[in-house]
Image (cartoon, rainbow, N blue to C red):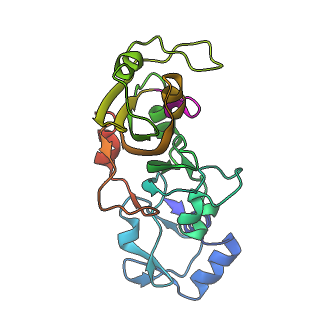
Amino acid sequence: MARLDRLLANLGYGSRREVQAMVARGQVVLDGAALKDAGARVPVAADLPQRMTVAGRPVDPPAPLTLMMHKPLDVVCSHREAGRSVYELLPGRWRARTPGLSTIGRLDKDTTGLLLITDDGPFLHRVISPRSHVPKRYLATLDRPLEGHEAAAFASGTLMLDGETAPLAPAVLEPLDARRAHLTITEGRYHQVRRMFAAVGNHVVALHRDRIGGLALPDDLEPGAWRILTPAEQAGLFG
């Protein structure tokens, strides 16, 4: 249970005073009846959007919330980086949610594909924890043809990146044609995939992440689009 005005303020609908005004105007409806008391305690569960409307529209999903997004090109994953951010692709009021939404890891501006966004701290840390060994698969398009030695180098567990002192964990390279390959890694070092190919004498010209753990980017999720993950999909990440 949660106090109504605090719940809607935490979902980004406005200050508690603004929410109280919405309630007074009869704009908050639960189970078909307009709520009159902004201080009323209401049940908070996953089915709340099916039971409550705000200004005639289903209320936003309460926390914990996890999304999958098809990140497009030229969009950044940080509030602090210059340029358009992935958060601008979400409803504007979601930037005022408490707890706030954060990306689970990052994709750089020039990388597209599967991105997870959540307000669930424990879930975020479980996905990114080195102990979880959650694999991430990328489709890399290369400047020059593969030479045939790259898969062994990536799988060796001895490959060093420039400027680092610890070798990379073994990774799996699956060539698709002369200049395209899937690369599956279990770490998340800075620009890791691009630097791995640089370490074997090649250059990535396009990079796309299509899978995290057991979760694949759906073919029908267009760049810039997003949807809410189901509990089964979240659990399937670790399967």
**191 in the magenta segment:** yes
Apparent side of residue 60 relative to residue 7 in the rendered image (left or right)? left
Q: Position of residue 217 (x, y in %)?
A: 34, 50
Determine the residue positioned at 43% across, 56% down: 70
Q: Position of residue 69 (x, y in %)?
A: 44, 56
Q: Is residue 178 above or below residue 186?
A: below
**213 in the magenta segment:** no
Dominant SS in magenta: loop
Apparent side of residue 82 relative to residue 38 in the rendered image (left or right)? right
Q: Position of residue 120 (x, y in %)?
A: 50, 45
Q: Position of residue 221 (x, y in %)?
A: 35, 61
The extreme bottom residue here reads 25
Q: Nearer the viewer, residue 202 or 7?
A: 202
Determine the residue positioned at 67% across, 58% down: 83
Q: Is residue 167 above or below residue 54?
A: above
Q: In what quadrant of the picture does the C terminus appear?
A: top left
Q: Nearer the viewer, residue 202 or 128?
A: 202
Place residue 9 in its image quadrant: bottom right
Q: How many marks?
A: 0
Determine the residue positioned at 50% across, 37% down: 122
Query: Is residue 158 visible from the viewing direction of this image?
Result: yes
Q: Nearer the viewer, residue 154 or 125?
A: 154
Query: Is residue 135 visible from the viewing direction of this image?
Result: no
Apparent side of residue 207 relative to residue 31 in the rendered image (left or right)? right
| Residue range corresponding to the magenta coloring | 187-193
Determine the residue positioned at 28% across, 46% down: 232
